Image (cartoon, grey):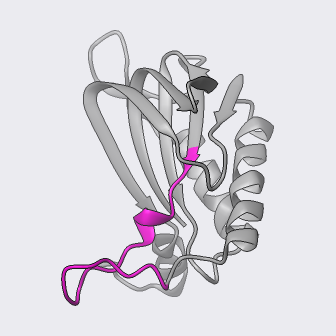
Amino acid sequence: MKALIQRVLSSDVVIDGETVGSIGKGYNILLGVVEGDTEEQARELASKIVKLRIFDDPDGKMNLSIADIDGEIIVVSQFTLCADCRKGNRPSFISSAPPAEANALYEYFCSLLREHGVKKVEQGVFGADMKVTIVNDGPVTIWLDSDIFRQSRRGGNPQ
């Protein structure tokens, strides 16, 4: 799983002119599911994101988590994060999970964020043409890939 986490002041998702999800201060997470991703990886990724300390404390240091600030999260499925651009100029998406598998892990990931106590978790609509508005705060943008968890358990050094 690949997650692009953006610290935001607000974010919303609009489909056909209708707002389907909207948050205030928190995270906009763009989530890509790779073929072979597992529920265990979703659990590790959700746990890491909830504990991630990228909000400023009173001294201006990034020391606070989403829970510490009582923040909100909006998660948007985005298979294009799985793009392989190593050959040619047209991205290949063959590594992205099949839609049914990807949607199931996307929904599971969102439910895990709720289980971790995030007060508001909004979602886009899987597979829809969405218009996403992001008011990035900082800007602070963090890239997480669940492959890092697999490599760290094996003692590997992620490159």
- In front: 101, or 59? 101
| Magenta-drawn stretch contains 83 | yes
Residue 134: x, y in percent? 38, 28
| Magenta-drawn stretch contains 3 | no
Residue 108: x, y in percent? 77, 55
- In front: 101, or 121? 101
Residue 96: x, y in percent? 53, 76
Looking at the rendered structure, the number of numbered marks drawn on it comes to 0
Residue 95: x, y in percent? 50, 83
The quadrant in which the N terminus is found is bottom right
Residue at the top extreme of this rendering: 58
Q: Residue at point 60% right, 49% down?
A: 128
Q: Is residue 53 above or below residue 89?
A: above
User: Which is the main secondary structure of the residues drawn in magenta?
Assistant: loop
Q: Is residue 69 above or below residue 4?
A: above
The span picked out in magenta is 76-94
Q: Is residue 51 above or below residue 85?
A: above
